[in-house]
């Protein structure tokens, strides 16, 4: 049952990266793809119906991790304290700034700066956290967290550009397409750099072939997105960049299996079996928490179907 819950936790967090990743990408690109106030409202409006629903996946993932793998959750969050504190603070700032920004004419420039800045912190922070997991604990700010932080920032930015290419209009869409082309080039360079850095410096990679293969899939997803975009298929490009945004999480979570928490002293590392909750707790979660996941997924699908057309005027934010 431990493997089932590890798969569920990974699926929920991968969903968060794939869905909220374009939120943060749009935030990073806000002042690049949208010049006027109306354009910025249109750009944020592209997120409108999905924005808060995307953030729910983070809450669900943290809750499921705490309940199913309490020992690993405690060690991971404590070990990454210097990363997680500014990261969670940035999530709060970003969520508040997006919703407050357009309520008054006063201070919109300040809110725009907060949106862009917090989106950068979140995007880099998640990548740095994944790099720390790969590098092992205690936390050391070496090359790997920096490289993975830059990689996730590029992938989320590319994902945000893909969303605006699909749901933006006129000049916003054109600038988003240009940004997507630039970020695709950056990602194509960064993925091999991250792969080499991981394979050379990560503490415990169980299979070089599996981890390297996942990086190859990540590169293919970036290239597929560029191909779809060039053929005028923005929805397919968005799906491809969503896969690319989620794959760093998959790579970090599977690289050291069956070890879940990697410590430089192997005696302090935790395997999946050592960190999982008891059978009684897992049985309770299986009945109460697991059914919520398809409900969340169904909610996202219905929301996307209802709001599948690009907004014609500023809405929501």
Image (cartoon, rainbow, N blue to C red):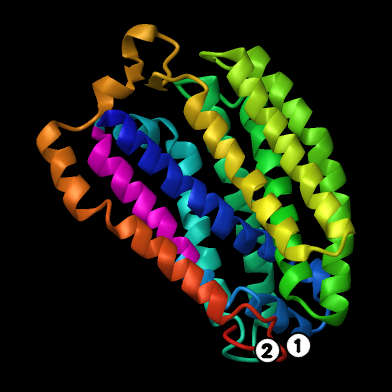
57 left or right, relative to 144: left
Which segment did they paint magenta? Answer: 54-70
Q: Examine the rendered structure and indicate whether residue 215 appears above or below residue 266.
A: below
Q: Is residue 59 magenta?
A: yes
Residue holding disc 1:
38
**Prevalent SS, magenta region:** helix
Residue 159 or residue 79, whichever sits in front: 159
What residue sits 75% from the left and 36% below the top?
219
141 left or right, relative to 84: right
**Residue 154 pos. (x, y %):** 74, 47
Determine which quarter of the picture holds residue 29. Answer: bottom right
Residue 115's disc is: none
What residue sits 46% from the left and 62% below the top?
55
**Residue 150 pos. (x, y %):** 71, 40
Residue 44 visible (yes or no): yes
Residue 72 visible (yes or no): no
Determine which quarter of the picture holds residue 114. Answer: bottom right
Residue holding disc 2:
314
Residue 81 or residue 170, whichever sits in front: 170
173 left or right, relative to 109: right
**Dot 2, crowdedness within 10 Å: few (<14), some or many (≥20)?**
some
- Which quarter of the rendered picture does the N terminus lie within? top left
**Dot 1, crowdedness within 10 Å: few (<14), some or many (≥20)?**
few
Q: Examine the rendered structure and indicate whether residue 159 appears above or below residue 266.
A: below
Q: CA distance from mark 1 to mark 2?
A: 7 Å
* Labels 1 and 2: the sequence-earlier one: 1
């Amino acid at each position: 049952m431990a493997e089932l819950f590890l798969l569920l936790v990974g699926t929920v967090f991968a969903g968060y990266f794939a869905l909220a990743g374009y939120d943060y990408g749009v935030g990073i690109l806000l002042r690049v793809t949208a010049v006027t106030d109306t354009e910025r409202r249109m750009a944020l409006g592209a997120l409108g119906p999905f924005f808060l629903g995307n953030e729910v996946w983070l809450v669900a993932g943290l809750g499921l991790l705490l309940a199913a793998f309490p020992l690993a959750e405690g060690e991971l969050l404590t070990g990454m304290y210097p990363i997680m504190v500014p990261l969670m603070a940035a999530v709060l700032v970003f969520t508040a700034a997006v919703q407050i920004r357009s309520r008054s004419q006063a201070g919109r420039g300040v809110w725009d700066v907060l949106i862009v800045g917090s989106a950068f912190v979140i995007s880099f922070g998640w990548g740095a956290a994944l790099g720390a997991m790969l590098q092992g604990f205690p936390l050391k700010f070496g090359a790997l967290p920096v490289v993975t932080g830059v990689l996730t920032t590029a992938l989320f930015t590319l994902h945000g550009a893909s969303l605006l290419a699909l749901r933006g209009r006129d000049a916003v869409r054109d600038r988003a397409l240009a940004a997507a082309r630039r970020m695709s080039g950056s990602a194509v360079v960064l993925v091999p750099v991250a792969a080499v850095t991981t394979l050379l410096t990560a503490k415990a990679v169980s299979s070089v072939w599996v981890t390297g293969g996942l990086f190859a899939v990540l590169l293919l997803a970036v290239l597929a997105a560029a191909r779809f975009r060039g053929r005028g298929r923005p929805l397919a490009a968005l799906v491809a960049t969503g896969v690319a945004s989620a794959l760093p999480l998959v790579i970090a979570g599977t690289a050291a299996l069956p070890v879940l928490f990697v410590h430089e002293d192997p005696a302090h590392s935790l395997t999946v079996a050592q960190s999982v909750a008891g059978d009684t707790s897992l049985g309770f979660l299986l009945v109460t928490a697991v059914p919520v996941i398809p409900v969340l997924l169904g909610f996202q699908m219905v929301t996307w179907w209802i709001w599948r057309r690009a907004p014609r005027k500023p809405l929501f934010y």
